[in-house]
Amino acid sequence: MTLVHFQLLSAALFALGVYGVLARRSAVLVLISIELMLNAVNVNLVAWAAYNHFDKVTGLVIAVFVITVAAAEVALAFAIVLRLYRARGSVNVDEIDIMRG
Amino acid sequence: MDLVLFYVIGFVTLLAGAGVVSARNVVHAALFLLTSMAGVAAAFVLLYAEFLALVQVLIYGGAIVIVILFALMLTRHGEFQVTAEHRRWPVAAVASIALFGLLAASVVLDDRARGTDARVGVGINRLGAELFERWAVPFEIASILLLVAMIGAIVIARGGGSDEP
């Protein structure tokens, strides 16, 4: 079990998240896929830290910050989705074109 | 032994990830996300990052999945139209497979990633000391970020004035 294994796991998770973001229609499901991608990045950071390829605390600290930002992002995204649902009665990302110029 | 554990954990994590992006039922998707997060936490344990595994279970399992389930309950997801994939989903599949190929190739060809099996853990003591000394300012900024996000979420969700776009 070397660093490559964890990096491949991380890459596969990230690709799954990208697929979800591109293919899903519900805003909440897109949000869930973004969480998947953030997790993949965390696996990568922690793996690099554990295999001592750079200062080993830095990777862990940045992973902590990623989790913090993910929590903040989910709260805000949830608020926006709720507001959007109240305004449009739908969370389908295809129908949301309010910002179209 | 470790390798077997890694394969089991990786298999579960990726299977649950595939469930997240393909489940028809949105609640199932959220529960698959929970499983996937648990798998990632197990991978953190394999990497001797116990504190992060703990935080992962607490924040993702305890907070984020709950918030997402609330979001699902408070919005209507009944109709097929919303839960179905976009009709151009094959393009998305090709794009994500291509991305995986690119990432995998760059990982496999990277010499630095090869070699040792030796992993080192960082104790919680050292992580905490580092977080409050060298990373003190970013840490405080992160706390302000959380506060701002919380207030912003309340303001946005309560709304005010007209909801018309």
Image (cartoon, rainbow, N blue to C red):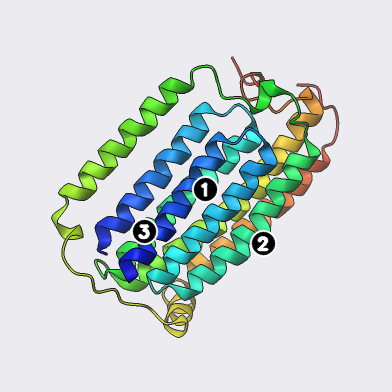
Q: Are marks 1 and 3 in contact (CB under 8 Å)?
A: no
Task: Report the chain holding disc 2.
Answer: B
Which image quadrant: the N terminus of chain A? bottom left
User: Which secondary structure, mark 1?
Assistant: helix
Q: Amino acid at mark 3?
A: Tyr
Q: Residue furthest top?
A: A101
At 26% from the left and 61% from the top, the residue drawn is A3
Q: Amino acid at mark 2?
A: Gly
Which image quadrant: the C terminus of chain A? top right
Q: Which residue is mark 3?
A: B7
Q: CA distance from mark 1 to mark 3?
A: 14 Å
User: Which secondary structure, mark 3?
Assistant: helix
Residue A23 visible in this rendered orientation of the protein: yes
Q: Which residue is mark 2?
A: B62
Q: Nearer the viewer, mark 3 or mark 2?
A: 3
User: Which secondary structure, mark 2?
Assistant: helix
Residue A55 lies left or right of residue A83; in this view the side is left
- Along the viewing direction, whichever of B73 and B20 lies nearer the viewer: B20
At 50% from the left and 74% from the top, the residue drawn is B51
User: Image quadrant of residue A52?
Assistant: bottom left
**Badge 2 or badge 1: first in the primary sequence:** 1
- Along the viewing direction, whichever of B18 and B62 lies nearer the viewer: B18
* x, y percent for residue B146: 63, 58
Residue B107 lies left or right of residue B68; in this view the side is left
Q: Which residue is mark 1?
A: B16
- Along the viewing direction, whichever of B162 and A95 lies nearer the viewer: A95
At 40% from the left and 55% from the top, the residue drawn is B10
